[in-house]
Amino acid sequence: MKLFLRLVLLSLVLYSCSSDQLTVSEYDKDLIESIERISPTGDVTAFIMPEAGDYTTLLQEPKNLMTPAKVELGKLLFFETGLGADAVKEVGKFTYSCGTCHVPAKGFMPGTVQGIADGGIGFGLDGESRARFHLYEENELDAQGARPLSLLNAGFISNTSWSGAFGAGNINEGTEDQWGVNTPTEVNHLGLAGLESQNIEGLHLHRMKFNKEIADKYGYTEMFDAAFPDFPTADRYSIMTTSFALSAYIRSLLPNQAPFQNWLKGNMSAMSNSEKEGGILFFGKAGCINCHKGPGLNNQNFYAIGVKDLYETGEAFATGPDDLRNLGRGGFTGKNEDLYKFKVPQIYNMKDSPFYFHGSSKRSLREVVEYFNDAVVENENVDPANVSSFFRPLNLTEEEIVDLTQFLKTGLFDPNLNRYLPTEVLSGNCIPNNDVLSKVQMGCE
């Protein structure tokens, strides 16, 4: 509590707070005590995210340490449709970007049940109108068989994807015999961290291309020179350096302006009483903290909670009951004890998305809370022996369900994620999509 009070005094400088903002209520005291009981540092600071530009506490690839030049380059490349040069059909070329499926206004997730890059058309305002382009057959689509994870707080994890398959070290040490067997993880042999590995594979998978010719054509050459001066010029304008820039940018995506973050830093009026009650439940009775840990409220563990798969929505393309991605960690390791276990996702800005879990099986945060409260497995394929011991009835009251939902919905909501969106990219193409329908819907031209 002494450290917390020092933080409150510090907030006088950080926030120029009024006396109301510095008033510590009973709700605040209870939430502080709930956090201190489980905090690895014994105080609330364990859950405070770095400020913009502070990369020191993020997990980084030693061969790709973050720099402002890399982050800025990655920010442009992430939304650059000029990379989409290897589309299956001519009409699809240069029409999509990473931002097509990871939309800032949707918490860096798709605006629909499933991400569709090449072969998709339209966008709407925030990706909610993305659909299959009729000129593409279903088997020609670049459509993901599990709902893409949010990219927020990726800087706190070492291995990426729902199965944690990408990245050579940490949790994947000892899995070398599985690299490239059932999943496209041969890239792990490069010995890189998860983001760098997945982005190298992802650029190929999503039919993107980058080289010196493209760098010169769109005007990125000087930015690559500034970001990667230690790379020989023959290797500087490549898929690897493109991946490195994207990875640096993704690590910078921190929802550190959420009310809970402001509260942690001493602004007592940043959250409502209902949000504070929900926070007390999160760190206490509801047990959410058992899985959602640290500043990013995510971690590297895998749990089976028995939710349905994406194909069961009836709204997804190019997936089905035999999709290996349905198996979670087990689809990568090949171990029965890992079947249907999925990595714990981060949960900031989930309000942005009406689709939850790897299979988009829930459509509101209220439904998510109710699912955990009831703790009834809905996927008959999941072996009860693999279901997490944390997945048990919570016995929350109606009021507690409302408060916990409110904490998740608004307490963890950063309202300004568009700060991570560039105003334009060097190609001059529309962002994040450049197809005819998207441009009309976005009012781009």
Image: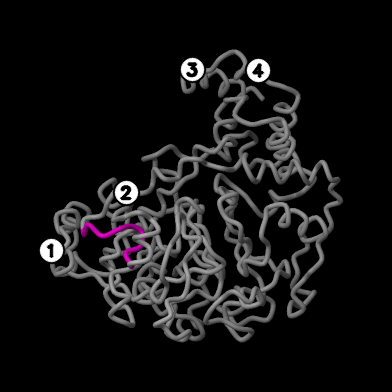
Viewer-side label of 3, 2: 2
Element under disc 3:
loop
Q: Is residue 434 magenta?
A: yes
Residue 205 located within the stretch drawn in magenta: no
User: Residue 23, labelled with which disc?
Assistant: 4
- Work out whether mark 2 precedes mark 1 in sequence or the reverse, and give the earlier one: 1
In this rendering, is residue 123 above or below 105?
below
Q: Which mark is residue 422?
A: 2
Amino acid type, label 3: Ser
Give the percent coordinates (x, y) of residue 328: 61, 74
Looking at the image, tell me whether mark 3 or mark 2 is earlier in sequence order: 3
Tag 3 or tag 1, which sits nearer the N-term? 3
Q: Which mark is residue 16?
A: 3
Viewed as shown, does residue 116 lie left or right of 298?
A: left
Instruction: Report how far apart the C-alphas of labels 3 and 2 lie in the structure.
Output: 30 Å
* Front tag of 2 and 1: 2
Marks 4 and 3, how far apart at CA: 14 Å
Residue to which mark 1 is pinned: 216
Q: Residues within 10 Å of mark 4 (few under 14, many from 20)?
A: some
Report, in whole angstroms, how far the alpha carbon at label 2 lies from the one at label 1.
20 Å
